């Protein structure tokens, strides 16, 4: 079965990247990105032992998650609009894409209404790409204290999307800068941040070498998305 073979290959690549970095492979979580994939593919992945899944769009997740095994954990990894926050808080265990204080405060309000605490990651546009969402690093540091005042949010770390390149080594500086920024955030907060969500199918090995704890893998597992 291609999915089983792909998963074995990805896990082996994760293990080798960890070995190069002197890390325990258990320190890296594989998040299977199922954008555009039907529930039966999710179930097949779950049957192979995957439990952590990521979706890009709230509407797709609302329709898909109820049709998938209930034991799975779902993370929102795509851009979140404030008008979709209520549904996102209801559907997802984690949100990776907090990119403004306004959005954080709305998530906080909705989490309070739903009587839950929500782990989040702060999205950073490390490379400053005009076509991508995310905090500028300086803006994040300026708003970090206010973000930390959102009582229903649990800030667990940072997330970034690196620029696409056929040569993964070229984005190593992006991942390194995110790791450096995490250290600066930890210093300001006076507390550790456990996670760096960075690296996708084309560059996750470099991301692991630079400290990724969550890698978001879609194409390398499932092949190209259905049209």
Image (cartoon, rainbow, N blue to C red):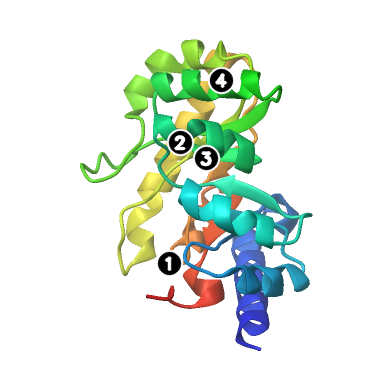
Q: Secondary structure at mark 3?
A: strand
Which residue is denoted by mark 3 in the rendering?
A: 96
Which quadrant, please, contains the N terminus? Answer: bottom right
Question: Could you say which is closer to the camera, residue 114 or residue 12?
Answer: 114
In this orientation, does residue 198 appear?
A: no
Look at discs 2 and 1 and give the one toward the viewer: 2
Of label 4 and label 3, which has the lower sequence position?
3
Q: Which residue is mark 4?
A: 108
Of badges 1 and 4, nearer the viewer stands 4
Q: Residue at x 41, y 15 (%)?
A: 143
Specify the quadrant of the image occupied by residue 123. Answer: top left
Where is residue 130? Give x, y as percent.
Answer: 20, 42
Q: Nearer the viewer, mark 1 or mark 3?
A: 3
Q: Residues within 10 Å of mark 3 (few under 14, many from 20)?
A: many
Q: Which mark is residue 202?
A: 1
Q: CA distance from mark 2 to mark 3?
A: 14 Å
Circle 2: is it few (<14), some (14-19), or many (20+) Cα within 10 Å? few
Q: Which residue is mark 2?
A: 84
Instruction: Measure how far apart labels 2 and 1 are at the Cα level.
Output: 29 Å
Q: Is residue 40 above or below residue 185?
A: below
Marks 2 & 3, CB-CB < 8 Å contact: no
In front: label 2 or label 3 = 2
Q: Mark 1, residues whose alpha carbon is within 10 Å: few (<14), some, or many (≥20)?
A: some
Q: Is residue 219 left or right of residue 110?
A: left
């Amino acid at each position: 079965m291609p999915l089983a073979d792909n998963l074995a290959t990805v896990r082996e690549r994760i293990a080798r990247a960890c070995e190069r970095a002197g890390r325990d492979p258990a320190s890296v979580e594989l998040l299977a990105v199922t954008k555009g994939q039907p529930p039966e593919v999710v179930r097949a992945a779950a049957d192979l032992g995957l439990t952590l899944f990521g979706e890009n769009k709230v509407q797709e997740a609302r329709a898909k998650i109820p049709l998938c095994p209930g034991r799975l954990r779902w993370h929102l990894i795509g851009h979140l609009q404030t008008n979709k926050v209520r549904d996102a808080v209801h559907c997802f265990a984690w949100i990776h894409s907090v990119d403004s204080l306004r959005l954080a405060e709305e998530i906080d309000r909705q989490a309070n209404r739903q009587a839950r605490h929500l782990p989040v990651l702060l999205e950073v546009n490390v490379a400053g790409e005009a076509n991508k969402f995310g905090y500028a690093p300086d803006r994040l540091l300026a708003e970090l204290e206010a973000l930390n005042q959102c009582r229903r949010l649990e800030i667990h770390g940072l997330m970034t999307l690196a620029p696409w390149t056929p040569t993964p080594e070229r984005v190593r500086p992006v991942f390194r800068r995110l790791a450096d920024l995490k250290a600066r955030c930890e210093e300001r907060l006076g507390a550790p941040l456990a996670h760096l969500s960075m690296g996708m199918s084309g560059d996750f090995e470099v991301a692991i070498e630079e400290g990724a704890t969550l890698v978001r893998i879609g194409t390398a597992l499932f092949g190209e998305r259905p049209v």
